[in-house]
Image: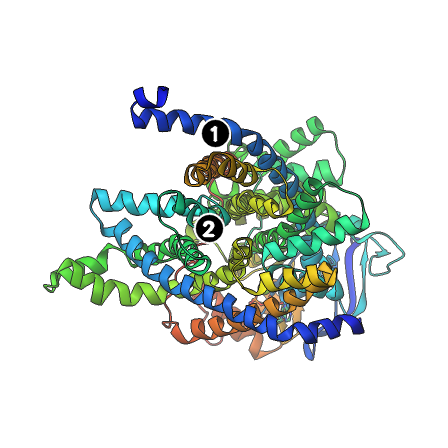
Amino acid sequence: MAEWFYFFYTALPAFLNGALVTLELTAVGVLAGFVLGLASALGRVYGGRWLRWLAIGYIELFRGTPLLVQLFLVYYGLPGLGLTLDRMPSAFIALALNSGAYQAEYLRGSILAIGEGQMMAGRAIGLSRWQTIRYIILPQALRLAIPAWSNEPVSLLKSTAVAFLIAVPDLMTRAKALAVQTYDPIGAYIAVAVIYLAMVYVLDAFLKLLEERARIPGYSVEGKKA
Amino acid sequence: MAAAILPPILWALIMLIEFIRYIAAGTVTTLAVTLVALPLGLVIGLAFALAHVYGGKVLTQVMRLYSTLMRGMPPILLLFILYFIISGSINLSPFWAGSIALGVVSSAYQLEILRGAILSVGGDQMMAARAIGMSRLKAIRYVILPQALRLAIPPWSNEASIVLKDSSLVYALGVAEILRRAQQLSATTQQPFMAFGTAALIYFILVFTANRLLDYLARRTQIPANPLG
Amino acid sequence: MSQPVLVAQNLTKTYGNNVIFRNISLSVNERDTIVIVGPSGTGKSTLLRCLNLLTKADSGKIWLDGVEITDPTCCSEDECRQRIGMVFQNFLLFNHLTALDNVMIGLTKVKKMPKEQARRKAVEELERVGLVDRAGHYPGQLSGGQQQRVAIARALAMEPRVMLFDEPTSALDPELIGEVLAVMKQLAREGMTMLVVTHEMGFAREVANRMIFMEKGQILEEGTPDDLFERPKYERTRQFLWKIAELHGRKAPEENG
Ligand SMILES: Nc1ncnc2c1ncn2[C@@H]1O[C@H](COP(=O)(O)OP(=O)(O)OP(=O)(O)O)[C@@H](O)[C@H]1O
Ligand SMILES: [Mg+2]
């Protein structure tokens, strides 16, 4: 046990660097995924036929396949088509595309929950379709989406760990290095598990706070599970 | 020679079929991993959900801790920890160790799904069952569970497709499932996009089919006009 | 004088520091129909739940047919509950079972009756509450009144010695109350021993042979319905009874009437 603490202590700087990479992956994935998700949710709800099918295709394909496969397709597959990307950009792209598909469904759920009435009311006072979406629908939908959506950052934080399979220098990769180095895989992985738990805990608490703050009194929608 | 004569599309199609045939062997393994992990997770999850809801204070706290810890770390990390623990104590193939570990990972998520379903059936149904003289155990068996399990089907189908997708994680243990076969193909054919694309396609078809089947099950077992939905 | 079926002595129930009732005693005799009334929150539901051991009283004793059921060595609680029927305000039918199966399940799973025999018995009980034609319906497909009648049949099927009713009609739309009360009146005529918490004063005056007015965890007054309505010991009793009678559409008598 004392030995384990010693390892943990000496590995801590490496772990913290790894944790930063993990957080970076999460942040980029969530933010870029949000943009993608919002665009495809709007496309799926308000788009014309082609746009709608494009959005549906994207959402369903990325929700229907493992993140790891998506990651390999980007990192190992794209070079086959002449597009070679580094590890980090590959991970960013795969995580963003994956998260975007899930976020699209959270956002679509809340947009649908707003209902036709608000669109009609917006159009009735002379706003264009786009203006109604921009000023009436989205301000409500985004807040309404928060309870369900707030699962996504935590879920993505955990998902980023698979990026170690393309040797992105994240927390998981550091754990593997330590496992090889110390011949104590269980000790090494439990050490990073503690760090992951702490990160998940803090992120979760932060999102709960956000959820609390963003609540519109007397207005909510059943959170749809991904 | 053939390549020169056939139009490229047809050529790609033939290659796709060849790829699918090669990866098909991995598909069987992927399904096998899922079919071990999912029921195992269900059994553990159900037992723990019952302990969480009906157990004493201590048991409830233990279950809460289990759920928080297991769901608080990446599945791949937990898979590794469990894999090394399992294969360190008994001699199991990576397939079995990985499938069992994946089942334990899923058990925490299934625990939460089932606990939610049991809670939404509610204490009143238990009271009504006790009022006609059923024991607690009988009430759970004949009144609570038949309702809770039905309510759990939609979120459970979601978990089922997560486990199906997460089965790709045992790739990291060297199990020859879809992704591992795709990687082998990629290495031998130098066609990585095609290889991993085919893997994605197969996963998509599996997940899609599983979802349809479970939707059908949910509709078949629906209680007419159930106030709980 | 007829036999006491259910007797409670000095029952006390608290939730934390909150005393729901203290030292309540009552006795229900064979063929009695006793109506309990009282303001909301006085512990009527809690009392009924204590009587069939769904909730444990803190102290006090309960006898069923002369056997003390609060004595843990006497018999199993589950057996006692079989012999005390209970009907809830919100019906509490088992949502996943048809009306027939709701009535049958206690017979097959608790009494271990063979399926065919249980089915015949269940059909009989549904006939008794006038719902054989709804046997295959699920609770969600029945009206509130019908659900409550099935719930009564479910309790009756266990052949209880006494039936406890906890505001069986207060969750019902007004036009559905009559059908449930009719079933209960029929039961009373057949000689079923019943303890009924209700605000249906018409039912109380017509059917009850005894009435109990409960307030703040105490039995304030007890007697025949006529005693309580016409010659109450306490002004409070008169006020309350006539107030709820009025709410249910009957007029209060003149000041000295
Ligand atoms: N499980 C419980 N835990 C704590 N307090 C309880 C519990 N059940 C009931 N109480 C409290 O006990 C008191 C009596 O409740 P009870 O339901 O028995 O009243 P009641 O006379 O049936 O009222 P009503 O006419 O509204 O049905 C209430 O103040 C209630 O808040
Ligand atoms: Mg009550």
The residue indicated by pointer 1 is B20
Q: Amino acid at mark 1?
A: Ile
- In this rendering, the answer to whether B188 lies above or below C17 is above
The residue indicated by pointer 2 is A71
Q: Amino acid at mark 2?
A: Leu
Q: Which chain hosts label 2? A: A
- Dot 1: few (<14), some (14–19), or many (≥20) neighbours within 10 Å? many
Q: Residue at x 37, y 59 (%)?
A: A33
Whether ligand 1 has any atom under 8 Å from the Cβ at mark 1 is answered as: no
Q: Residue at x 46, y 64 (%)?
A: A25
Is the N terminus of chain B in the top left, top right, bottom left or bottom right quadrant?
top left
Q: Is residue C94 visible?
A: no
Q: Which chain hosts label 1? A: B
- In this rendering, the answer to whether C163 lies above or below C159 is below
Badge 1 element: helix
Whether ligand 1 has any atom under 8 Å from the Cβ at mark 2 is answered as: no
Q: Foreground: A191 or C247?
A: A191
